[in-house]
Amino acid sequence: MLEQARKLLQSHFGYDSFRIGQEQAITQVFDGQNTICVMPTGGGKSMCYQIPALAMEGTTIVVSPLISLMKDQVDALQAAGIPAAAINSSLDVYEVREILHEVQMGIVKLLYIAPERLDSEMFLDGLQGVKVPLIAVDEAHCISQWGHDFRPSYRLISRMLEIFPDHPTVLALTATATPQVREDICRILDIKEENTVITGFERANLSFSVIQGQDRERFIRDYVQKNDKEAGIIYAATRKTVDSVFESLVKRGVKAAKYHAGMPDDERRLGQERFLNDEVTVMVATNAFGMGIDKSNIRYVIHYQLPKNMESYYQEAGRAGRDGLPSECIVLYASQDVQTQRFLIDQAQDPSRIPGELKKLQGMVDYCHTENCLQQFIIQYFGDGSASVCGHCGNCVDERESQDVTEDVQKVLSCVIRMGQKFGKTMTAQVLTGSRNKKVLEFRFDKLSTYGVLKHMNSKEVSNLIEFMISQELLAVEQGSFPTIYVPDGGRDVLLGKRRVLRKGVVVTKQIAANDP
Ligand code: ADP
């Protein structure tokens, strides 16, 4: 079987060998074992169901969340001479019937469907009697409430599985599964955990860095001009920021395009095409841009603002350097971004999901404050504790001297304990810097022995120190209606003098640009 798979890889796609993980996933599918395949973006997940689809008798169904993604895949397959079709909301009833007819005739090898289709009786009836050896669930994290992109219609997949009497094999694919999401996918789609194929999340050619305290617009202008021959994406959190960054680049003669959900469809599509065809070098976009984009020579991905969580960040940053050449992934961080993201979380989510989303946001904030290897931080976040340091991220190459900050850290810790471990970062910083704020006085915190013990620092510096301590697990955050901080075991060790804390510190060089949201 595997030999045949290799031949198909060569004859239909022109590749000589499988990439890591592909072979294992394909073998398990041939064996009829439900499988989950976790690979980074660009890892080559599609091949894991396209090859079996070609080798097996019948029609493979691929559930995919985005019409544009489906369209690209179907076009590419058809161009390679593989009979593929897609059913989604852009088709009328007659077109759907026509495709279902072709499926019934056994002509279509790969049928892409949007999950919403599974709600339609007509559609499910049309599939009755079709031989379906494999159901591939792309972007499978959409099935989990814990994922960053939960789509209720993904839950209909279980229902679809019931209509095929000869039990198709299920292959779930995702780039962004934390252990919790992975468990969820396995439970809902009936996949044994040992049938997980997970390939390294490490992307050795990517250099990560976090830049804080810069004029962001100026940073972008300088960076883009310095790298004017290279393709790159700049992600911003709001449409307004996309517009203003785009304007400022175009004004300076940079060949840029923009992309966000507030633009007319054709304008967006045109921008995307110009970027894909190298007519412009820079794409300025919200996170609406990028899913399913197959452009291998992206040399940098800059996040103009803090992304909402590590899952989205790694997926977006991972669009850089798919060709394996050195590429940069930069987050421009300012602490006020945390408020913007909190606001967006409060607005958009159903209330039961807010604590989970806030916890993930904290993971992203931790990333911005850690002084450890950034690549290693990411890989550990995704559940692999064995990762080594990358040697080339912003932190690995940071040559500033470390300072012993144990005493300041102890002062913060004992202040948090004296305040009853029931308050947030800002209030704690106010007490430590000796603020006369009304609330501080109301709670009589000015009477604490730790009141004003960090007077020599301003409250922003103390807040930064607290964030650094959180990223080092010396303090922890309790996500309630508002976040409070408490002292976990790691912090106790420092208080008891069992452990010293080194820090390179943050140099604030410039005020942040005034036009942030
Ligand atoms: P993912 O879905 O994991 O993000 P894709 O399936 O889109 O990734 O694959 C990314 C790129 O890698 C595509 O251009 C694809 O053609 C290419 N690719 C996949 N498998 C192989 C392989 N075995 N050898 C070389 N290139 C491959």
Image (cartoon, rainbow, N blue to C red):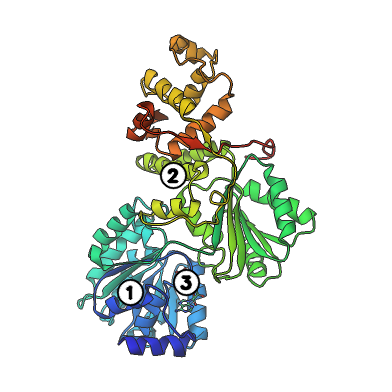
For mark 2, does the 10 Å Cα neighbourhood hold few (<14), some (14 to 19), or many (20 or more) residues? many
In this rendering, position of residue 116 left or right of residue 161: right
Q: Residue at x 26, y 64 (%)?
A: 189
Q: CA distance from mark 3 to mark 1?
A: 21 Å
Q: Looking at the picture, which amino acid does disc 1 mark?
A: Ala
Q: Residue at x 50, y 44 (%)?
A: 371
Residue 482, quarter of picture: top left
Give SS at disc 1: helix
Tag 1 residue: 25
Q: Nearer the viewer, residue 292 or 206?
A: 206
Q: Which mark is residue 363?
A: 2
> Do the residues bearing badges 2 and 3 touch, measured as CB atoms within 8 Å?
no
Q: CA distance from mark 2 to mark 3?
A: 32 Å
The location of residue 469, given as percent across then percent down, is 45, 34
Q: Nearer the viewer, residue 264 or 97?
A: 264
Give SS at disc 2: helix
Q: Looking at the picture, which amino acid does disc 3 mark?
A: Met
Q: CA distance from mark 2 to mark 1?
A: 30 Å
> Do the residues bearing badges 2 and 1 touch, measured as CB atoms within 8 Å?
no
Tag 3 residue: 70
Q: Looking at the picture, which amino acid does disc 2 mark?
A: Gly
Does label 1 point to a residue whose CB lies under 8 Å from ligand 1? no
Q: Give the mark nearer the N terminus: 2 vs 3.
A: 3
Q: Nearer the viewer, residue 115 or 367?
A: 367
